[in-house]
Amino acid sequence: QVQLVQSGAEVKQPGASVKVSCEASGYTFTGYYVHWVRQAPGQGPEWMARINPNTGATNYAQRFQGRVAVTRDTSITTVYMDLSRLRSDDTAVYYCARGKYNWNDFDYWGPGTQVTVSS
Amino acid sequence: DIQMTQSPSSLSASVGDRVTVTCRASQSISNYLNWYQQKPGKAPKLLIYAASSLESGVPSRFSGSGSGTDFTLTIISLQPEDFATYYCQQSYSIPYTFGQGTKLEI
């Protein structure tokens, strides 16, 4: 069965960086995008980025450009999301999600990783 | 960015009711519209993709319609497990954006 397993919760100080991992299993890793979506407390989801695991090509939301980087390691079917220069309003649950190449709906989601930014 | 506006923001209903949630895009998105259900503390779950296609395993009491800028999610014969928050999402252009959500309450 399709599974996306994410790394554990993180607490970071303002200005620091965080790296969240997402290990995929149960499907052909290179056959789907992996997206990153975050959700701040009490807010709706917000799309951040996607990666094509086959080519490594990435797309980022403009508001995160220069602060976010998504990479993948096909040998261990894992995608990573790096977010730098953290601010308090980056406190959120960060999800990875699988997306179809032709549609970009998110049909499987990881359980989420809580990232808390606090001094 | 394409803005997605949902209405209502909250909705009270009873088991067995039929409810409709509306989503409007700030520009035409063809049928690149998806609907999700989210329960507290859980990841969103895909219900409908391509405006009207039911995701595998989702009960047939859920349906979607619309194209262009106006879309609806309809749930017939509400079940207790349907009380949750619902989000629309456009997958027409990056950045993919979500509506603000509709909380369905008993």
Image (tube, rainbow, N blue to C red):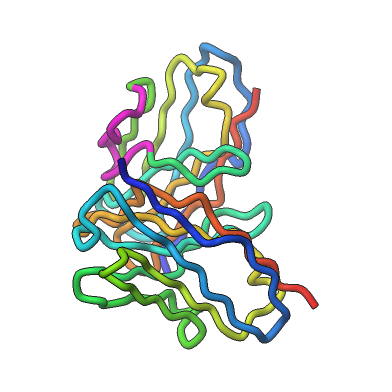
Q: Residue at x 41, y 28 (%)?
A: B74
The quarter of the image holding the C terminus of chain B is top right
Q: Which image quadrant for residue B14? A: top right
Residue nearer the viewer, A1 or A85: A1
Work out which residue is located at the far right of the displayed protein and give it: A119
In the image, residue B51 lies in the stretch drawn in magenta: yes
> Eyeballing the image, is B91 above or below B44?
below
Work out which residue is located at the far top of the displayed protein and give it: B16
Residue nearer the viewer, A48 or A76: A76
Q: In the figure, is residue A47 to the left or right of A118? A: left
Percent across and percent down for residue B58 are 35, 28
Percent across and percent down for residue B28 are 31, 57
Percent across and percent down for residue B105 are 64, 28
User: Magenta span: helix, strand or loop, mainly?
Assistant: loop
Residue nearer the viewer, A119 or A90: A119
> Eyeballing the image, is A58 above or below A26?
below
Q: Residue at x 36, y 60 (%)?
A: B27
Q: Which residues are magenta?
A: B47-59
Work out which residue is located at the far front of the displayed protein and give it: A75
The quarter of the image holding the N terminus of chain B is bottom left
In the image, residue B8 lies in the stretch drawn in magenta: no
Q: In the figure, is residue A89 to the left or right of B65? A: right
Q: Residue at x 68, y 79 (%)?
A: A87
> Eyeballing the image, is B46 above or below B60?
below
Residue nearer the viewer, B27 or A49: A49
Q: Residue at x 52, y 25 (%)?
A: B82
Q: Which image quadrant for residue B59? A: top left
Q: How many marks?
A: 0
Percent across and percent down for residue A45 are 52, 56
